[in-house]
Amino acid sequence: MYYKARQQKRNGKWYPQSVLHGRTVTTKQLCDDIAQASTVAPADVLAVLRSLSDSMVKYLVEGRSVKLDGIGNFYLTATAKGNGVEKAEDVSPQQINKVMVRFLAEKQSSVGGIKSSIPTLAAAQINWQRLDTSSSSTNSATETEGSSTGNGGSTPDPNGGNE
């Protein structure tokens, strides 16, 4: 995983910011990797991944979160356009202008022999390498936000009580 130094405009201080480096891993590459690590053919892996996508969308649009063990939780958030309305009864879906899929990575931990899942990916478990922003190899690197994206309110609990 790579990072670069980035100066924030609001306080002038420098912070690490994660950056993508290299080409995006494709579905075909994932299928080939999974097939090599199992007894399943790449075409069968692809069929399962396509079905997984369809099933996830089905549940997400129902307002449910989707938990994939060992991977994490997926859920939808929405943002509204404009400045809001004066009365609660005037709120409508027409105000929604963007729907996003959110993801919280799962981290397995064990305390006193009890397994629990914490939706986070510990930075200490990642081998961070500084990406020299002056080199020409970084021209293809795509920046990613290293901080919370914030959706104008609290993040819903993806493990929420309504299953």
Image (cartoon, helix red, strand yellow):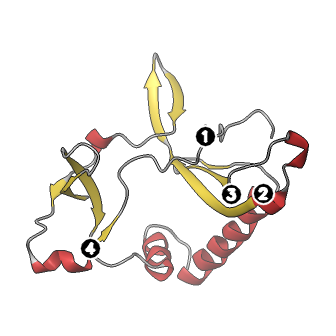
Residue 41 coordinates in the image, percent (x, y)? 55, 80
Q: Image point 30% across, 42% down: which residue?
A: 123
Q: Which residue is mark 2?
A: 59
- Badge nearest the viewer, 3 or 4: 3
Q: Which residue is mark 1?
A: 155
Residue type at the position of mark 3: Gly
Circle 2 — which element? helix
Q: Earlier in the sequence, mark 3 or mark 2?
A: 2
Q: Image point 73% across, 49% down: which residue?
A: 84
Residue type at the position of mark 1: Thr
Q: Are marks 4 and 2 in contact (CB under 8 Å)?
A: no
In 3D space, how far apart are the residues under numbered discs 3 and 2 (Cα atoms)?
28 Å
Residue 60 coordinates in the image, percent (x, y)? 74, 57
Circle 4 — which element? loop
Q: Residue 1 is drawn in which quadrant?
A: bottom left
Q: Are marks 3 and 4 in contact (CB under 8 Å)?
A: no
Q: Which numbered tag is attached to residue 141? A: 4
Q: Which numbered tag is attached to residue 82? A: 3
Q: Image point 48% across, 82% down: which residue?
A: 28
Circle 1 — which element? loop
Q: Earlier in the sequence, mark 2 or mark 1?
A: 2
Work out which residue is located at the far front of the displayed protein and give it. 86
